[in-house]
């Protein structure tokens, strides 16, 4: 059977997964309501976090599809996938048009010589402008240096949510047949007779983990056939050679993996039995075969420490709280989380390196759901030495805001060492692009939301390491710290909310040293949130409940990571996210400060 290998790529939310799900439905591979976003966190956040494989059958052809994540923190994952497929469906929202991640994934695809099929999706939106968007996509191809063949891309119009596609606007919208036919017509057959008769070469582009089978490699068979129980060599581009034995072999079918005895050239397989296999290595049959070109893995950009929770409330909510349990969990994460690095050498903390705040937040969120308690320190950017010069990560920031807010935003970003590279009107809004050190950006998101009253959209993407920008002045926001342990009372919170924004509500249990809010003006402030009204002054005992409090700011993992200060820890348990001072008593904090 012929095989075609494609990836679906796009900016976040443009409809990749919806389209993949619809393709599975139409070909009978999945029921109504079944989604590729199968992970609990994905469903909750409504985004794809992990790229996933599926396959569908259409007209005697097997189409392997990789659904990729659109969020920039997972961009390097997309890049790896692109190396291993033959064409992409570039999905573009018919209203928003090309966005920063559209540009990034298209650029990578064009550089690899792929010929994308453009899918203009969501044409049902009231403000959809499919013709204009097609024009914009064409311009983007030109800007990114597409060759003549790539410029002749086919455009399909779709409403992925309804499972329909058309070759022209106005065609009958029945199902996804026009898209499936286009895939069969345009995507090269995955293997030739010649490749099929050569000796085996497989290259993994993704990793998975199974409690019984251990590490699994997901890779493309470039040449030859692979069989269960095969003895193989694993070659790296550096020339190292190891041996291994395939214990189990799977192909993809809909959302399932299907165990097979053998798979042939062109197919995408999942391989068990190679516990130390890694992305980009070549699995082959004899030592003379050449390793396939390496697959680049992007370096981490931020780091932070993971510690055992030692807050006064430690152990109340979690099942797994010890150093050893945390270490084992992190070691397991390293099996599959390709962008992650961890330094286990220190006795009292583990240093975790990741690709961005969201990358780390997803790991932490998974851990707390599994019952772990943990503390983390403030994230820092990674500084690298390149030829004796200090380098730091930079990001491209795309901001879409109401026109009248441009002044404030430009001023703030410039202060943080951002430079504007582009500014253009965008449907009654202004879109501005900046380049800024990641360091300058840390903690900015919250300010941005406040400054733009929630109306702005900010989108960031790491663009690489550049020479260090020097000191960046940031107005550190002071913390409001509890001096007491007990239950926070409405009466005291009512008075405290005059001084800043609170993170807790009445009746929240607090401890000495816990950060319960921020301070609008000035430095850290120690307060007593447990103080009740003097009994003599109280008219009725129920008075406390009658107090109306401003709703608190609910700390999420990401927002807390971005607002926490250097002398604080974030305490994460299955039920709570608490900010605290590293030194819990005022006395110890003063002493620690003096030592500095
Ligand atoms: N109006 C409209 N909405 C759509 C259409 N296709 C998808 N959506 C909606 O767009 C949202 C995002 O869809 P997803 O398929 O999750 O987008 P995605 O590209 O996979 O997102 P990430 O994987 O997180 O990058 C969902 O709320 C969908 O219901 C469409 O054709 N029309
Ligand atoms: Mg998705």
Image (cartoon, rainbow, N blue to C red):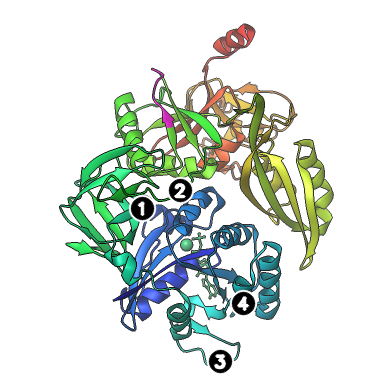
Determine which quarter of the picture holds residue 356.
top right
* Mark 2 or 3, nearer chain start: 3
Q: Taking 179 as reference, is 274 above or below it?
A: above
Of all residues, the one furthest to the front in this rendering is 288
Q: Residue at x 45, y 45 (%)?
A: 362
Q: Are the residues flagged by discs 3 and 1 in contact, CB closer than 8 Å?
A: no
Give the Cα separation between the discs numbered 1 and 2.
9 Å
Q: Residue at x 75, y 36 (%)?
A: 416
Q: Are the residues flagged by discs 4 and 1 in contact, CB closer than 8 Å?
A: no
Magenta span: helix, strand or loop, mainly?
loop
Q: Taking 553 as reference, is 343 above or below it?
A: above
* Mark 1 or 2, nearer chain start: 1
Name the residue tied to disc 2: 295
Name the residue tied to disc 3: 171
Q: Residue at x 52, y 92 (%)?
A: 172
Residue 203: assigned label: 1
| Camera-side mark, 2 or 3 | 2
Secondary structure of residue under mark 2 = loop
Give the Cα separation between the discs numbered 3 and 1.
41 Å
Q: Which residues, given as a range, are shown in magenta?
A: 342-347
Residue 397: assigned label: none
Q: Are the residues flagged by discs 3 and 4 in contact, CB closer than 8 Å?
A: no
* Mark 3 or 1, nearer chain start: 3
């Amino acid at each position: 059977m012929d095989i075609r290998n494609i990836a679906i790529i796009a900016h976040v939310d443009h409809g990749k997964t919806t389209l993949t799900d619809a393709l599975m439905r139409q070909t009978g591979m999945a029921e109504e309501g079944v989604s590729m976003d199968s992970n609990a966190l994905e469903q909750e956040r409504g985004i794809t976090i992990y790229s996933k494989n599926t396959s569908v059958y259409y007209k005697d052809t097997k189409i392997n599809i990789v659904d990729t994540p659109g969020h920039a923190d997972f961009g390097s994952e997309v890049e790896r996938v692109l190396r291993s497929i033959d064409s992409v469906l570039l999905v573009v929202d018919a209203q928003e048009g090309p966005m920063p991640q559209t540009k990034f994934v298209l650029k990578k695809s064009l550089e690899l010589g792929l010929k994308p099929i453009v899918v203009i999706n969501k044409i049902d939106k009231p403000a959809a402008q499919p013709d204009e968007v097609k024009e914009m996509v064409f311009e983007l191809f030109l800007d990114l240096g597409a060759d003549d063949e790539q410029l002749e891309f086919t455009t399909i119009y779709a409403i992925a949510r309804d499972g329909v596609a058309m070759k022209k606007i106005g065609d009958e919208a029945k199902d996804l047949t026009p898209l499936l036919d286009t895939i069969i017509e345009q995507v090269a057959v995955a293997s030739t007779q010649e490749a099929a008769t050569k000796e085996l070469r497989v290259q993994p582009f993704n990793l998975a983990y199974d409690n019984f089978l251990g590490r699994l490699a997901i890779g493309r068979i470039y040449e030859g056939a692979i069989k269960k129980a095969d003895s193989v060599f694993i070659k790296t581009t550096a020339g190292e050679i190891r041996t291994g034995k395939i214990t189990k072999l799977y192909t993809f079918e809909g959302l399932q993996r299907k165990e097979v005895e053998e798979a042939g050239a062109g197919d995408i397989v999942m391989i068990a039995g190679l516990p130390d296999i890694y992305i980009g290595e070549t699995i082959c049959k004899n030592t003379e075969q050449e390793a396939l070109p390496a697959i680049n893995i992007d370096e981490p950009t931020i780091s932070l420490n993971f510690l055992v929770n030692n807050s006064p409330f430690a152990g109340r909510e979690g099942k797994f709280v010890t150093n050893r349990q945390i270490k084992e969990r992190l070691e397991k994460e390293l099996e599959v989380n390709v962008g992650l690095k961890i330094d286990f050498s220190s006795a009292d903390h583990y240093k975790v390196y990741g690709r961005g705040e969201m990358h780390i937040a997803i790991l932490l969120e998974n851990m707390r759901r599994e019952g772990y308690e943990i503390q983390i320190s403030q994230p820092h950017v990674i500084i690298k030495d390149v030829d004796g010069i200090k380098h730091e990560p930079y990001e491209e920031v795309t901001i879409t805001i109401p026109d009248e807010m441009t002044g404030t935003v430009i001023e703030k970003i410039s202060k943080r060492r951002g430079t504007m590279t582009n500014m253009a009107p965008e449907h009654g809004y202004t879109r501005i692009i900046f380049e800024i050190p990641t360091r300058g950006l840390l903690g900015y998101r919250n300010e941005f939301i406040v400054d733009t009253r929630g109306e702005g959209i900010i989108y960031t993407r790491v663009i690489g390491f550049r020479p260090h920008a020097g000191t960046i002045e940031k107005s550190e926001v002071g913390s409001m710290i509890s001096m007491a342990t007990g239950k926070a009372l409405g009466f005291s919170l009512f008075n405290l909310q005059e001084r800043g924004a609170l993170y807790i509500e009445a009746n929240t249990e607090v401890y000495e040293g816990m950060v319960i809010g921020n301070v609008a003006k000035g430095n850290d402030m120690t307060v007593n949130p447990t103080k009740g009204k003097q009994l003599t002054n109280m008219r009725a005992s129920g008075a406390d409940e009658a107090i109306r409090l401003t709703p608190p700011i609910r700390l999420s993992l990401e927002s807390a990571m971005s607002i926490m200060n250097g002398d604080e820890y974030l305490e994460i348990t299955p039920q709570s996210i608490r900010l605290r001072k590293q030194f819990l008593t005022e006395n110890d904090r003063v002493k620690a400060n003096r030592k500095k």
